[in-house]
Image: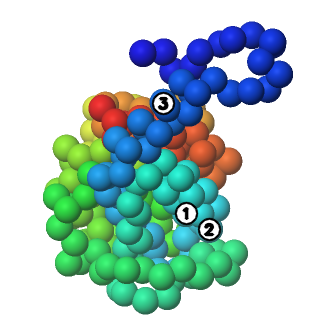
Amino acid sequence: MQDRIDLGDWTGGYECPLNKIRKEEIALALSDKKVLMVVPERDFNDEDYDRVKKVLESKGVKVTTGSSYVGEIRGVKGAATRSMVDVSGVKYYDYDALVFVGGPGARRFAEHEKVVKLAKDAEYKVLGAIGIGVAILAKAEVLKGKKATADRSVAEWIESKGSTFTGQPVQVDGKIVTAESSKYAEQFANALVEALQN
């Protein structure tokens, strides 16, 4: 089935009903999918978190926010959100994908034993990371032999863990989706959606 039926300019801006049906099929297919967004308790990138979460939820994905404790967590720009689960007690198999959010706090999370173990245990799930959050996947050694992109400040470190740093805005290698920065958050989230459909 085609993703889009092009009826030319004569439609006057009217969207073909088949396009609407396709969007509804995608939302229905994703409505049973669950994603855990792993977010540092402080100094996470607000834009990474907000943009990715909005795209995933708009596609019907159930998103849970997890951190090192249950309660209020704060982004680097002061935005607050609530962690619903403590990642030290999370079972990776309860989720279809795990997404690691970037920001300065992600550097600390790359040293958090339970966060790194969670990423390692979920190695065969869809895994996503954006910006500095990619360092968590590298520390868990799930990027070994894979192509990845990230914030340039961690590029050398990621390569030292056996990954090929591509410098692309968004990089997909199998079930692993990485992004350079929040500038590409929507593209990153859409690549996650595609990975969840496969």
Separation of disc 2 and disc 1 at Cα? 5 Å
**Residue 130 visible (yes or no):** no
Q: Residue 54: percent from the left, percent from the top?
A: 56, 58
Residue corresponding to mark 3: 22
Residues at badges 2 and 1 in contact (C-beta under 8 Å)?
yes
Residue drawn at (20%, 62%) of the image: 94
Residues at badges 3 and 2 in contact (C-beta under 8 Å)?
no
Position above or below: 151 against 40: above
Q: Residue 68: percent from the left, percent from the top?
A: 35, 81
How many C-alpha atoms fall within 10 Å of the one at disc 2: few (<14), some, or many (≥20)? Answer: many
Q: Which mark is residue 46?
A: 2
Q: Which mark is residue 49?
A: 1
Amino acid bearing label 3: Arg
Left or right, 111 with reference to 11 = left
Q: Secondary structure at mark 2?
A: helix
Q: Quadrant of residue 79?
A: bottom right
Amino acid bearing label 1: Tyr
